[in-house]
Amino acid sequence: MSQRVAVTGGSGKLGRAVVTDLLQHGWEVHNLDLVAPRDQECEHTRIDLTDYGQVVEALTSIDSRYDGIDAVVHLAAIPGPGVAPNAATFANNVTSTYNVFSAARHAGIRNVVWASSETVLGLPFDTPPPYIPVDEEYAGRPETAYSLGKLLDETMAEQFCRWEPSMKIIGLRFSNVMEVADYARFPAFNDDPSLRRWNLWSYIDARDGAQAVRLALDLDATGFDEFIIANADTCMTTPNAELVEKVYPGVPLTRSFEPHETLLSIDKARRVLGFAPQHSWRDA
């Protein structure tokens, strides 16, 4: 019998890829989103995640749709800084995440994966990172209201797992999500390395982001953990050594790296989740 998963934000850029991937791997998927999907791959329910009552109902039962949920993937959010005023972004995103975590706990759901963000690493790196490649080992350095909210989401996840030790809540610090159509813009980035310096020239193909979600759902674990999720390469043809020397001179290098290897380290995701990016803009 397939497991039933609710995906909040399933109509969005990453959400669409997640819905497709989970369906292909045998999950029964239900999309919870204010916005209707452009392609109806699974059941869609319109929901306001800032309304706790709606979230509780959506994670327990909805007439004619389902009775009970096995897992939650929480992707819905105002998607970045500047999309809405700071206070509105913070209020929407943090409240929605609290509601999802709390409703999942009370519904007996113990498997939760949600979209944290690369921004907790200190993006846009106007203050240089403490070292390169960056990883999950240093404390969060939010520089925007959006990023602050994501860091508080991680703190909430840790505390929910302390309250409910049987829960697994995994935060995926996604890099900038891209679809195949976006790759036409990539060659122009090489003309000016400063255009993409803000996230160390990284990105995540939506399909590989979906792979990370599925692997996190499948992970046999309890408690809170977080993982950087980026593609294996940068968005540049200029070698990393040249980029770093030009844009971030003096920043310590903790190890050697390949000419086009991602500088948002995915070593932990590879080791723990088995994450193995399959796509690259270079193949598009």
Image: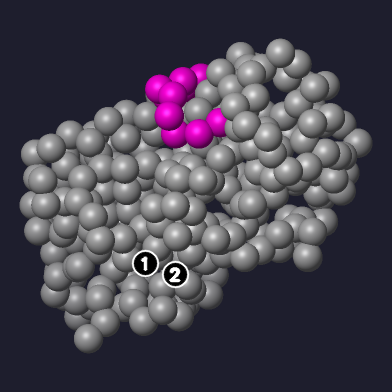
User: x and y percent of residue 245 in the render?
Assistant: 80, 22
Which circle's residue, 1 or 2, is located before the other in the chain?
2
- Cβ atoms at labels 1 and 2 below 8 Å apart: yes
Chief secondary structure of the magenta portion: loop
Give the answer, above or below, for where 83 lies relative to 37.
above
* Residue at image point 78% right, 42% down: 259
* Residue at image point 53% right, 75% down: 39
Q: How many labels does the image show?
A: 2
Three-letter amino acid code of the residue under disc 1: Asn
Quadrant into which the N terminus falls: bottom left
- Residue numbers of the magenta segment: 134-147
Q: How far apart are marks 1 and 2 (CA)?
A: 8 Å
Judge by depth and name the residue closer to the eye, 264 or 156.
264
Q: Residues within 10 Å of mark 2 (few under 14, many from 20)?
A: many
- In the picture, the disc for residue 138 is none
Three-letter amino acid code of the residue under disc 2: Val
- The residue carrying mark 2 is 19
Instruction: Mark 1 vs mark 2: give the one in front.
Output: 2
Q: In what element is the residue under mark 2?
A: helix
Quadrant into which the C terminus falls: bottom right
Is residue 145 visible to the viewer in this orientation of the structure? no
Q: How crowded is mark 1: few (under 14 residues within 10 Å), some or many (20 or more)?
A: many
- In the picture, the disc for residue 31 is 1
Q: Which residue lies furthest to the bottom in this view?
A: 1
* Residue at image point 69% right, 49% down: 233
Q: Quadrant of residue 42?
A: bottom left
User: x and y percent of residue 8 in the render?
Assistant: 36, 57
* Residue at image point 59% right, 22% down: 131
Judge by depth and name the residue closer to the eye, 264 or 270.
270
